[in-house]
Image (spheres, coloured by chain):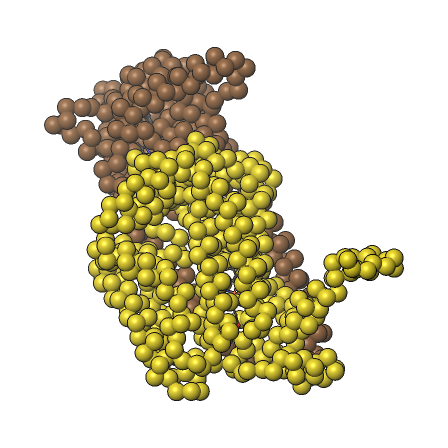
Chain colours: A brown, B yellow
Amino acid sequence: MKELFILAVVTVFTLVTYYLVEPFAHSVMHKHVESEHFAYADLPALTKTGDAARGKDLVMGAGACSDCHSISVAGMPARMDAVTSAQSYGVNPPDLSNVGVVYDAKFLAALIKNPAHALKVEHKYTPESGKEHPMAFFAGAGGDIDQEIADMVAYLQSIAVKQDKLTPKMAFETACGRCHAMKYENWTQIGEKPAFKMKKDELAFDIQVIDYQDALTKYMGKLPPDLSMYIRSRGEHYISTFVENPQHLLEGTAMPRVGVTAASADKVIEHLADAGDTKRFEREEVGKKVMIFIVIFALFSYLWKRSIWKDLH
Amino acid sequence: MAHFTKATSVHDWLNQRLGIDTVRRVMATEYWIPKNINFLWAMGMVLAITFALLLVSGIFLLMYYQPNVNTAFDSVNYTIMREVDFGWLWRHVHGVAASVVFLVIYIHMFTGIYYGSYKKGRELIWISGMLLFVTFSAEAFSGYMLPWGQMSYWAGMVITNLFSLGGLHADGLVEWIRGDYVPAQAFLNRFFMLHVLLLPLAIMGVIGLHFGALRIPHVNNQDGEELDFEAEAAKYKAGDKKHSKVIAFANDFMSKDMFVVGIFLIFFFYLVFFHYDFAMDPVNFDPADGLKTPEHIYPEWYFLWSYEILRPFSTNVGLMAFGFAQVIFFLLPFLDRSPNAVPASRRGLFFIWFWAMLIDMIVLTSMGKVPPIEPYGSIGFYAALTFIGLWIALPIITMLEKKA
Ligand code: HEM
């Protein structure tokens, strides 16, 4: 039939144009990076089985983790408030309560041994720069250093919530929250912004945030962006491969490789979607219903046309 | 003064005052449309419906949008997308409709070109159509400024810069258009006004003109056959609908239009809910930042072909080529020197011209988006030359055309 032939021609030209301006143009403009499934293949595998009880002593003692980090589940408060911490270290070291589930075990071990290496920021801490990473590396407590590190990792895993209890928000706060604000979820780098009764208190809070951001900007070279709408501006694939290894997509960037597990990366991305694509489930639901409605509308309009045109042919 | 009698019904009351029966006859039941047409003749109705969707969704968005450089981005991405019930739906409908309307406009235009529907009394339909194309383009561009994202800002910067007119260095003109040295509050405010008031008014006026221009010449048909509308209408009215070559606008033509609209809406809502990214550029979900130029700046897909006519040349030549591309379609009825108003398939060289023009514009469109690295830079350059060459060739090949 002639009309179907014309429809086919229109469709083919439309699809060709679509292909050229969307998939094709994007493939030219943006480097495509394949996911490595958060395997961290460059880091050595853990060879020792850790002991959580010994790990606890190391974390609180010789490892000195609690000098800089709070561990709220273990009742270890922060030594300094977030702003002072950032002014000393550049950024507020994250609370260690859930790092055992958020971060990959192999990555944690490598981080304790050599933070700049695991975080892939060695380009910032070359011998010539004279700078050292603010997180002190662990030189060993006198025994087998690999065993000691495995013990600490085992301890951190033992205190963390179980994987299925880890919420998207917790994953985000532990892994990204010290650097990235998220205005649409009321998140600032120093924590959730409370509702204030007095304008004065609110301003005082805002000033703390600004002080923190100043320190962070000095440390990172630029202020990490607010991630509220990043799920729409970058998309899931970009964010996931960027988090896995920021250097692949932005060479020389100051954002460290954070070392999250694949499951935690999914949680983080879910949190970004909760902020920037809040209505995605509603959209699916409503979408299905509208499609059914429109198909029925088209059917009825077809029947109407047939009933009118039977006198015309 | 006219003579009024006591009304026998509401209908009669209105009829005495507004002549609704006459209006209905002239606009609907005795507005004759050729029977020999295909679904491409429903594109006008599809455009009217899409414009209605834009208008309604736009009114809803307008209730929450804030034209202020500090709050515009959040009023769209937070208030409308998260807080307002179904705000996301209105925004997606508006964004997708703004993109799809151009697809349909291009189909509608190329239909007109293919069937020669811009000649023999239909020149004004074509010219008013082109006015619609221009006002829609301005409407789409001004709307794109409103979310005040990175692409709004930088596309606004690049496009308003064109008004420095290259070697003329009319920087004063650029500042006058922006109301500032760079796109800022004054810029956002005036594009807001254009987008929600002046341009929609202009569009509605021009749609009126477009429809008015259609009434006397009637629409063309699939074979370019010249119909004796009075004789055919008489046949129709006498009850011989089967042999009459015309149908009434309502309900005959309408019922077919509505079926096409139904199919179109399936496609449209599929895009709204499940495939909207092409119409809402990801880059525009980063807030405007005058200190950070995006890696790639490109206009929306429907402007790419003319952008690509600008880009491959040096500034001044590019601007002239761009100016040429903007006005040349207006002149189509006069550059086509052939008296034949029949489908391109019966017009020899013009048939080749038609497909060459269509394919060339698709090539330009795709090259307009990618960065001008090789081979894309050269492909774009030659496609732009081809575009200009085709228009220069048009009067010649149509003059040579034999009477069909
Ligand atoms: C964007 C808003 C527009 C609307 C709402 C619109 C609407 C319509 C309608 C309802 C018709 C009659 C039915 C049909 O043939 O489809 C029509 C015909 C026509 N339009 Fe448009 N139109 C628009 C834009 C344009 C543009 C951009 C052009 C080209 C420059 C154009 C050129 C024509 C021509 C040549 C016809 C006559 C077709 C024939 O005689 O067969 N229109 N338009």
Give the side of residue A6 with respect to residue A100, left or right. right
Residue furthest front in the image: B1
Q: Residue at x 47, y 22 (%)?
A: A193
In which quarter of the view is residue B368 placed? bottom left
Counting from the top left corner in percent of width and height, residue B181 is at 31, 36
- Residue B230 visible here: yes
Is A162 rendered above or below residue B226?
above
Residue occupying image coordinates x 46% and y 64% = B127
Location of residue B194 with respect to B68 vertically, above or below: below
Q: Is residue A249 left or right of residue B341?
A: left
Quadrant for residue A292, please give it: bottom right
Residue B339 is situated, as x and y percent measured from the top left of the image, at: 43, 81
Q: Picture coordinates of residue A116 (x, y %)?
A: 23, 30
Question: Which residue is at the front of the view, B133 or A128?
Answer: B133
Q: Between B52 and B23, which is closer to the camera in this rendering?
A: B23
Residue A168 image offset from top left, x and y in percent: 47, 34
